[in-house]
């Protein structure tokens, strides 16, 4: 089902489609973060990525709960946006030999992922409210807040030490 297909007839269909999109994204991130952890030289960045991997596993579970609360089987739709962000990160990581520069590149890639997720969760929360799915809002908001916190930690780490070491 594409975003603008006949399969999306109403706001509920759009909500479910977007939920499947973010579910796909979260599952892809669970598979990608261990590779990023392995490539990281900075102990603080490694720790941040490990913490966020645990959080992302919980994000998957919360999204599954939202599907359940909404009365829909959990499922995914392909998400070309997250696939592109991950592909770009993998290409950059393969091209950088300097570990300090690589850490800066990994932070940039991780923040691209975080920003994508922040937009998706913000939209899902707004739509859940409009649909009267208040029971879903709290779960989605927990994920959103953790994504924002991860982004802030990455910014602080980049600006505090990683970018300087890379320069």
Image (spheres, rainbow, N blue to C red):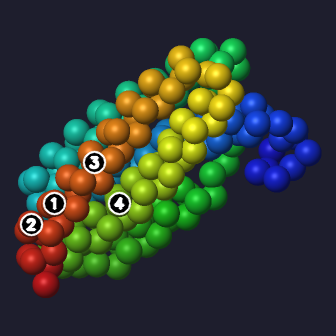
Q: Are marks 2 and 1 in contact (CB under 8 Å)?
A: yes
Residue at figure coordinates x 19%, y 47% from the top left? 48
The answer to whether residue 64 is above or below residue 14 is above
Q: Earlier in the sequence, mark 1 or mark 4?
A: 4
Would you identify the image quadrant in which residue 89 lies? bottom left
Q: Where residue 79 sits in the image (x, y, percent)?
A: 63, 52
For residue 54, side relative to residue 115 (left or right) = left
User: Residue 6's x, y, as percent?
Assistant: 91, 45
In the rendered image, which residue does mark 2 sit on? 160
Q: Secondary structure at mark 2?
A: helix
Instruction: Establish if 124 lies above or below 69.
Output: below
**Disc 1 target residue:** 156
Residue positioned 69% across, 15% down in the render = 71
Which residue position is annotated with label 3?
Answer: 150
Residue at x 61% of width, y 30% of height: 128
Residue 32 placement (x, y as % from top left) = 40, 50
Query: Which quarter of the figure is the C terminus placed in?
Result: bottom left
Q: Is residue 29 above or below residue 62?
A: below
Q: Which residue is mark 4?
A: 111
Q: Label 1 to label 4, Cα distance in Å?
A: 12 Å
Find the distance from the CA under tag 3 to the CA under tag 4.
Answer: 8 Å
Residue 76 visible in rendering: no
Q: Answer yes or no: do the residues labelled 2 and 4 have beta carbons within 8 Å? A: no
């Amino acid at each position: 089902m594409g975003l603008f297909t006949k399969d999306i007839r109403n706001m509920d269909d759009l909500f479910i489609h977007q939920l499947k999109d973010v579910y796909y994204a979260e599952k892809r991130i669970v598979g990608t973060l261990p590779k990023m952890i392995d490539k990281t030289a900075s102990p603080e960045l490694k720790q941040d990525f490990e913490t966020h991997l645990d959080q992302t596993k919980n994000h998957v579970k919360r999204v599954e709960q939202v599907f359940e609360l909404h009365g829909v089987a959990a499922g995914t739709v392909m998400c070309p946006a997250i696939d592109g962000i991950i592909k770009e990160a993998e290409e950059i990581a393969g091209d950088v030999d300097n570990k300090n520069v690589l850490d800066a590149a990994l932070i940039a890639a991780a923040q691209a992922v975080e920003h994508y997720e922040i937009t998706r969760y913000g939209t899902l929360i707004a739509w859940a409210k409009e649909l009267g799915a208040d029971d879903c809002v709290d779960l989605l908001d927990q994920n959103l807040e953790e994504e924002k916190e991860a982004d802030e930690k990455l910014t602080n780490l980049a600006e505090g030490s990683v970018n300087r070491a890379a320069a």
